[in-house]
């Protein structure tokens, strides 16, 4: 069953989504939306539960949001995590000197529920699984990231991408003269977009009212931008997004914009430089 | 009675020309100070958008102080008061004022050093002597902090320069140490595994840097163990509560005898 799409939520009924370990509950009372979530011990795997009417769950903490206008519809759209993810491979990767390799893994997504006026009001955003927190950098400076153990595959077909996950491809370039051993990989999810395979006919916009999740199974595979990791020497790794080239654009269309736009203007670079010089 | 009447005292001011000049001066002061407030606010907002709140506060103060001096000069010129004579008078008065205001001057100079040293910023949690609180403002004469039990404390800059100041929230992540003693019959490798599992079960505890497990010593009541848990500085209370809860649960479940448990001061 398709997780993403638009769903009708009748008044004063509780609906449940179960994707991976996430249990998400939604209740509507006219313009008031109540939502709650928790995580089950086990994943539902390939059998997600989508917009199923259930009784009122016990022991969950409800949150309430009042939208601008009355609309019984809700859109469930995929989002990448809101912070970078440090992926820990099941085995450390060693790449030969001057070698390049393309690897694939499945990345857990966030569910974004939108409703209200023109389905543009965000009701909630919640991850399909609970990721651990980890720190990337030294103890003086760095960035708070999510930590995630993944099985890294050599071919995309080998990757099991359950509902609620997207396929992520990673190109690693070892530009050094020594073997590069990588025991963790930082994925800048907040600046990446999500894509789905193009459908015949007019291309649809982002997940909107016209995409009915129950009737549109073609959205099942989502992928994110390609990440390029260049290993230049020990402890020096450059991370950049792969280009949105013609091959990508021919087969895939972007369905979710990056959460944060990468800033590369002269003004922004100037201010960043000034901050670094003055430590402001 | 042959006293001086109010009319006689105010006679020079009540002359039509002088009253107009003073009125104009007051108006200029009001307008210029209002404009200065607006300019300082806008400049502060622009700086805050790109830099930190601390930079915003410093910029706003610089604009306000410089602007105020400029306004005073403009108004004096409007009133036709000679700046040369005034500066001469200030020179003589300065010596007397200097003696009287030694502490204030010391505080101002200390304030300049504090601002340039950037030991802490607005919003940082600092400990000065016995006081711990969040920095509300860094001014020329003093800093103001709000203690954790919501008291307002003003600390003179001179005191800060002379004392040891701990900026608790300087770095984005911190380590909390839990120290306890387990009985001698405890299986230590199994205990280590249990402790790691406890830490892993709490989302606010960081995977990296790895938790610290240290067998400190064989003490009189058992084996002294230290567990150091890393967390993002915002999660202090959550981590402290959750780790204590889960440790207790785990010790009870695994039948680990714990004669003593305590939390060390943060390292």
Image (tube, coloured by chain):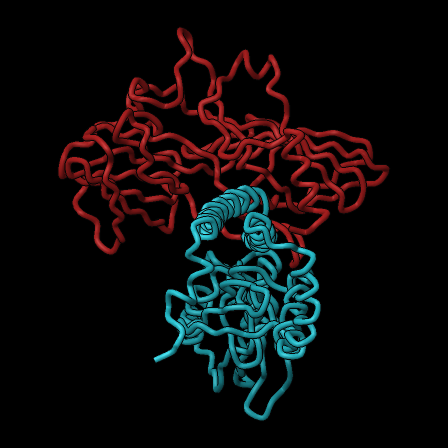
Chain colours: A red, B cyan
From where the camera sits, is residue A264 visible? yes
Q: Looking at the image, is A3 positioned above or below residue B58?
A: above
Query: Residue extending furthest left?
Result: A12
Q: Please tell me in which quadrant of the rendered image residue B120 appears.
A: bottom right
Residue A116 lies left or right of residue B236; in this view the side is left
In front of the other: A167 or A112 = A112
| x then y, percent, for residue A191 | 55, 33
Residue A170 lies left or right of residue B137; in this view the side is right
Residue A251 lies left or right of residue B102; in this view the side is left
Q: Tell me the residue at 41%/31% (across/down).
A: A78
In front of the other: B173 or B120 = B120
Query: Residue extending furthest front?
Result: B2
Query: Residue extending furthest bottom?
Result: B220
In front of the other: A33 or A219 = A33
| x then y, percent, for residue B27 | 44, 48
Q: Tell me the residue at 50%/81% (across/down).
A: B262
Q: Which image quarter is the N terminus of chain A in?
A: top left
Q: Please tell me in which quadrant of the rendered image residue A8 appears.
A: top left
Q: How many marks?
A: 0
| x then y, percent, for residue B128 | 57, 76
| x then y, percent, for residue B59 | 59, 51
Residue A34 lies left or right of residue B80; in this view the side is left
């Amino acid at each position: 069953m398709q997780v993403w799409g638009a769903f009708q939520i009748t008044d004063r009924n509780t609906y449940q989504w179960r994707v991976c370990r996430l249990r998400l509950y939604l209740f509507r009372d006219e313009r008031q939306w109540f939502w709650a979530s928790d995580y089950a011990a086990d994943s539902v795997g390939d059998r997600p539960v989508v917009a199923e009417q259930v009784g009122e769950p016990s022991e969950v903490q409800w949150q309430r949001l009042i939208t601008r206008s009355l609309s019984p519809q809700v859109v469930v759209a995929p989002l990448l995590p809101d912070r970078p993810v440090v992926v820990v491979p099941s085995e450390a990767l060693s790449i030969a000197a001057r070698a390049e390799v393309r690897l694939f893994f499945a990345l857990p997504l966030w569910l974004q529920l939108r409703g209200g006026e023109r389905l543009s009001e965000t009701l909630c955003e919640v991850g399909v699984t609970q990721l651990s927190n980890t720190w990337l950098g030294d103890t003086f400076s760095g960035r708070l990231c999510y930590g995630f153990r993944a099985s890294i595959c050599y071919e995309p077909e080998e990757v099991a991408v359950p509902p609620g996950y997207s396929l992520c491809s990673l190109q690693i370039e070892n530009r050094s003269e020594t073997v590069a051993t990588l025991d963790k990989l930082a994925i800048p999810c907040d600046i990446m977009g999500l894509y789905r395979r193009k459908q015949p006919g007019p291309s649809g916009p982002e997940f909107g009212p016209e995409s009915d999740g129950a009737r549109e199974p073609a959205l099942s595979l989502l992928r994110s931008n390609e990440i390029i990791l260049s290993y230049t020497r020990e402890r020096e790794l450059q991370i950049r997004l792969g280009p949105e080239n013609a091959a990508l654009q021919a087969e895939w269309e972007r369905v979710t914009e990056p959460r944060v736009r990468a800033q590369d203007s002269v003004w922004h670079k100037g201010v960043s430089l000034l901050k670094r010089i003055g430590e402001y | 009675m042959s006293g001086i009447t109010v009319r006689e005292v105010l006679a020079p001011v009540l002359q039509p020309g002088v009253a107009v000049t003073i009125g104009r001066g007051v108006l200029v002061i009001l307008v210029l100070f209002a404009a200065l407030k607006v300019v300082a606010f806008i400049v502060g907002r622009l700086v805050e958008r790109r830099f930190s709140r601390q930079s915003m506060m410093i910029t706003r103060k610089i604009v306000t102080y410089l602007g105020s001096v400029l306004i005073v000069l403009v108004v004096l010129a409007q009133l036709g008061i000679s700046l040369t004579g005034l500066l001469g008078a200030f020179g003589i008065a300065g010596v007397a004022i200097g003696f009287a205001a030694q502490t204030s001057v010391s505080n101002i100079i200390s304030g300049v050093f504090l601002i340039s040293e950037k030991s802490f910023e607005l919003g940082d949690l600092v400990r000065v002597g016995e006081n711990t609180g969040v920095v509300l403002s860094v001014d020329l004469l003093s800093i103001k902090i709000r203690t954790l039990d919501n008291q307002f404390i003003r600390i003179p800059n001179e005191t800060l320069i002379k004392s040891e100041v701990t900026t608790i929230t300087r770095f984005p992540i911190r380590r909390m140490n839990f120290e306890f003693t387990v009985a001698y019959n405890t299986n230590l490798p199994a205990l280590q595994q249990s402790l790691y599992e406890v830490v892993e079960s709490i989302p606010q505890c960081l995977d990296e840097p790895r938790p610290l497990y240290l067998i400190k010593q064989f003490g009189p009541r058992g084996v002294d163990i230290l567990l150091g848990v890393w967390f993002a500085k915002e999660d202090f209370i959550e981590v402290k509560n959750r780790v204590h809860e889960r440790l207790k649960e785990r010790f009870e479940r695994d039948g680990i005898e714990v004669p003593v448990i305590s939390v060390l001061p943060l390292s």
